[in-house]
Amino acid sequence: MQTVYRGELSVSYMQFYVESRPEEFGEAPWNASAGQRNGLCGASVPGYLFLTTGLHTGRVGLTVEVHAQEPPVDDVWEDVVEASFRPASPRASVLPWGDGELCAAELAETDHRVRYCARGMDVEWDAESAVLDGGPPVDHYLLQFWPAPPAPDRVVRQTSRCAAYWHKHARGLPPPPTPEELAEAARREREARERERAEAHERVERQRWGGRIPSERVLAVADNVRTLVGLDRDLIDEVDAAGPRAQRDLARWAARRALTLAGLDRVGWTAAGLDALDRGEALPEPFDDEARAFDRLFDDPEVPKTLVSSPDGRSDNVLQQAMALPALLGAADPDPLGAALGALSHAAVTWGPAYPELFAEARAQLPD
């Protein structure tokens, strides 16, 4: 036999606890006696014990023991109950109400029997006052653990009015949920959280996409269409419905319209890029490196420099040629839908506030 603790325990609200759940340490479930015969040692929550005292507030005597086998019941104890207990970790801590660990029993993570013995539970008011004034404890408790297979809890001995009251209270509680019921409740809670996340995600996506979420095809090329969402949301769906061949043709058309408007169709190396695009070939150097293509755009004296306002009219100093060049790069996207939407987006910025005219022409390019 091992004596883990012998001394005094401070109690409040007639309770203290044994806690072995690392992830829920110190959280006191108030239904720990649900479904039991005894109301002094609540053991219906796995890995946790809720222990009731006669004294409301003050100090009680407490002894904690660990045995290798079931010990005899000493006649000195007036109220005795037993329950099954399986630690959730190797450390079963004894916790006063609202305080840290008093002591801890090192128990194997296997089934145990716990016996809770009490003496002097019917504490009178004047006796409780004496304890609070520094007098010795008037009620004493013994907590014993030993390995044993699971079995129903039981009242071994009942003497005090206090114990009788708590036994009656426990028997009036509804039984705790079964493992199957707990699993079902957890499943429902998990599904509810998943629905909430999905609904929140959908609300955000609808807002991002102008009130309606597009097809999976459009979502896959979302980076190419951000500009179009705020300019003409319907055009996105129309291009999506046109099919790959029409999308590829539209991409080439939009790139050429953008570069022509910016005067880049008359610059040799950008015109060569347009011709390669029309032939379905890979874009020539320097379009294989976007950074080098822009460096050449800014350094080439043959490239015109014209300004255009942004489509929303908030800026009037946008370099038109810098807006047009990405239309050619976007039109070379291997995905026809991404190419069409990317080229249209950059062409719209090239046209500035006149973009509705471009979009009207674009619709005319689409099949009926």
Image: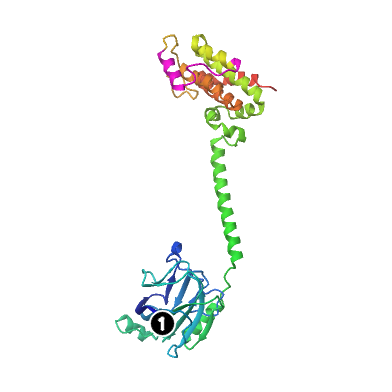
Q: Work out whether 185 lies above or below 206.
A: below
Q: Seen in the image, is 33 located left or right of residue 127? A: right
Provide residue 99's location: percent of width, then percent of height: 36, 69
* Residue 128: quarter of image: bottom left
Residue projecting furthest to the front = 68
Say which quadrant the N terminus sits in: bottom left
Is residue 170 toward the left or the right of residue 317 in the image? right
Q: Which residue is mark 1?
A: 141
Does the magenta-highlighted stretch encompass residue 135?
no
Between 111 and 258, the one lying in front of the other is: 111
Residue that appears at 54% across and 20% down: 355
Three-letter amino acid code of the residue under disc 1: Tyr
Q: Can see residue 107?
A: yes
Q: Vertically, is 197 above or below 9?
A: above
Q: Quadrant of residue 203?
A: top right
In this figure, what is the number of numbered marks? 1
Examine the structure image and report whether residue 294 is included in the region drawn in magenta.
Answer: yes
x, y percent for residue 361 = 61, 18
Dot 1: within a 10 Å radius of its alpha carbon, few (fewer than 14), some, or many (20 or more) residues? many
Pinpoint residue 14: horizontal percent, then vertical percent.
42, 77
Q: Residue at x 51, y 16 (%)?
A: 284
Give the residues in magenta.
278-299
Place of residue 190 in the rendered image (x, y in percent of width and height, measured from the top left): 56, 55
Q: What quarter of the picture does the C terminus occupy? A: top right
User: In this view of the protein, can residue 357 be seen by the observer?
Assistant: no
